[in-house]
Image (cartoon, helix red, strand yellow):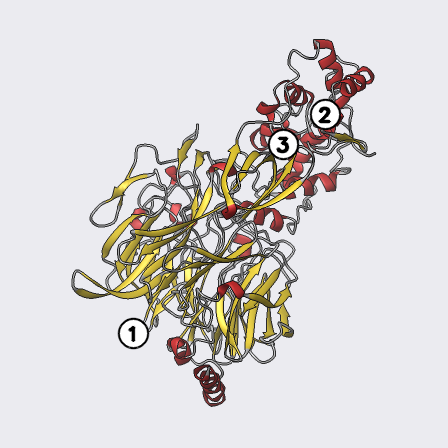
Amino acid sequence: MKPFVFASLCGVLCATATGQVPFERIVNADKEPGSWLTYSRNYQGQRFSPLTEITTANVNNLKVKWAVQFPDSQNEVSPIVADDIMYVTGPNSAAALDIHTGRTLWSWKRPVPPDYHNIGFGRVNRGAAVLDDKLYVATLDCYLVALDLKSGAERWIAKVADYKLGYSMTVAPLAIAGKVAVGVSGGEAGIRGFVDAYDAKTGKQAWRFWTIPGPGEPGHDTWSGESWKTGGGSTWVTGAYDPELNLVYWGVGNPSPDWNGDVRPGDNLYTCSLVALDGDSGHLRWYFQFTPHDTHDWDSAHVPVLFDAKIDGRNRKLIANANRNAFYYVLDRVTGEFLAGQPYAKQTWARGLDVKGRPIPASVSVPTEKGALVWPNLNGATVWFSPSYSPQTGLFYVAVREIGSVYFKRDTEYKAGTFYPGGGEDELPADDAWGEIRALDGKTGDVRWEFKLHSPPWAGVLSTAGGLVFSGSDEGNFYALDAGTGKPLWDFQTGGTVAANSISFTVDGHQRIAISADRVLYVFGL
Amino acid sequence: MRARTIILIVLGGLIVPQILIASRSELSFSQTNSTTPDATAGKRLFERHCALCHGIDGKGGRGPSLHRAHLVHAPDDAALKSLIGDGIPPKMPGAWFLSDEDVANLAAYVRSLSKIPSDPLPGDPVRGESVYAKSGCAGCHIIAGSGFGYGPELTDIGERRSPPYIQQAVVKPAASLPEDFLLVRAIAASGQAVEGIRVNEDTFWIQIKDAKGQFHSLRKQDLKELRKLRGESPMPSYDGILKSSELDDLVAYLASQRGKQ
């Protein structure tokens, strides 16, 4: 276990010299596998742990080492672990926990305004970002808050948007060199979405990228009339980053209103797209739209996953996305060029993808007055919870929701700060729905194995160099599968719905796995 | 298990139903303006969002009739408004997406229903109690502490279900199964079979209650077969067994079961 001790020591020394978590430590995340310094552990969005103590041979001996109860229910947090401290968040709250025991070292809370309404989602927070000596937390009422890592004291607060217009924030920020990027929720309230970056030291806005282009901007002609002003395009799931290309990759949500596209003819750029933004300026480098003119609420709100692989004899820098619309996509992350794509779950809305990756719509695909049965349902074949990519197996692991819905279209009127749906769905009964963990060939999307779940899941996937895949279920199971075959090797009943992403880190050189289940965060080890 | 959501009780993309249910309890649905609620506007909302369970006219269906002065879960207007927003997990979804004004209008309409008297039932509840006793219902159901707990308790069945629904449940039990009800048959590797009501299930385990009230907790990977007997009920149909008047009396008796007062 010497390498871990060394890594930890290095962390302390680095902290003394240049602040506790400088940008370079996050870039070089693989040099300290015992830490978890950014939402997906590395900038590549892989949610893969290089730790190898827990393996397919011994995972059956996993036990609870400690647990901590949160003040709020239904936690979706993915913790940060740096220098023997775990940082967790909840709705408008954050805390630092002792990594040996889970005991609180400091906590911070900001009141939720009494007139705040969450429109279309729960009161959750999915995690924090760390950079230098600060922890960055986004709040439901749309503030980005920088906290002192040592005390939890507020260093600065930046107002990102006005919650009274339907904006909100549940996202874990993404800290890059000198800046903190965040996105917003509100796709069901007719917001105009954006990705923002703030100066990490001062909280001053560094740049903003509007996901719905304004008059005169490229893509504006994919909207009609005034519809762009209330066009949605939320950005509620943490992006990924390529430090060499200095590109921030971020998924964009559904157009508004969700289910009635009549008021917004056109492709509705950049909704349901992946955008690549210059890290310094926020300028758009390229985009790829997965679902043009979406009418099913299929946000492309996913963690983009970056990896390099040889395709047709050529080394390519890739970006992959298992989309809510049930297709898996592989793109060139330098140019956005479409390289491969195919369904990874049941879908009935498209006949396939054309050579450029644009969907070819099926005859029954859009919501109607009487209702149209379409797979997947509005929550999609997968959604915000993280996939995982293992460089060891070359497999992309995704938690899949197999469920269809009858989609309806209705008239709707925009009223600022209220629900702006244009329809809805009647989802198929629970016994007609199920879940899967699917392992896809990262380069092609071919299914290598699958493991069936009792119901459509709401939890992300972690893969490890110990040859394991961890995930959770709505019914409270937290479990480990063989990363090569999908065979179940271990499971534990947490007693609460698992609706979060798992992480792995070390305590005194020994590997731990952490997962939130409703009100409790569990930490497991051998 | 998730309850089937009704039309337009939509989930806005970011979250699954049970999380919404949990989160809704934090929402404030207090009325902030002082204008008089509009019951006519409330009626339109009711027909769109509530009628699937409570009936187009509020006389009940899968859910209870609202034609009554006393609503068990909503003794006053403030409670009614917060109930509309929060729902009653897991059986009633909350209308979290409605504005304060909409909720006030809807509450006003629901209150107006209480002034409409319920249709009188043809049967006699006193005679119905005898029908209940002689038909062996207590062999599977508990009312007010008496009976056997294999099937659902019926102590407050008159609060939860409308008379037509109760009648259908007696005549065609399999056509009116409660939400998430499932009869299952599990066969162990040894060939031993367990049949009963699924009381819980996850990816790895299933818990079954058999007709003797015995619980069985079974690891799925140890089973040779797990058959889900969808649309089947362990309850026999009383169609043709009870005379028409006896059926009316039994329904009247069950509809009068309003729980512990």
Residue A244 bears which disc, if any? 1
Real-space CA distance between mark 3 and mark 1, rounded to the nearest whole angstrom: 58 Å
Q: Can residue A213 be seen in the rendering of this structure?
A: no
Q: Nearer the viewer, mark 2 or mark 1?
A: 1
Could you tell me if the residues under marks 2 and 1 are in contact, i.e. CB atoms within 8 Å? no
Residue A443 on image: x %, y %:
26, 58
| Position in image of residue A487 (x %, y %) | 42, 55
Earlier-in-chain disc, 3 versus 2: 3
Q: Badge 3 sits on which subunit?
A: B
Residue B42, label in figure: 3
- Which residue is painted at 66% across and 20% down in the image? B170
Residue drawn at x 30%, y 47% as measured from the top left: A222
Q: Are marks 3 and 1 on the same chain?
A: no
Q: Position of residue A161 (x, y in %)?
A: 50, 60
Marks 2 and 1, how far apart at CA: 68 Å
Q: Which mark is residue B67?
A: 2
Check disc 3 and give the amino acid type.
Gly
Residue appearing at x 54%, y 61% in the figure: A125
Chain letter of disc 2 in the image: B
Which label is found at residue A306? none
Q: Are marks 3 and 2 in contact (CB under 8 Å)?
A: no
Decide: few, some or many residues near mark 3? Use Cα within 10 Å; few <14, some 14-19, many ≥20: many
Of residues A373 and A50, the one drawn nearer to the viewer in this rendering = A50
Disc number lying in front (3 or 2): 2
Residue density around tag 2, few if under 14, some if 14–19, many if 20 or more, within 10 Å: many
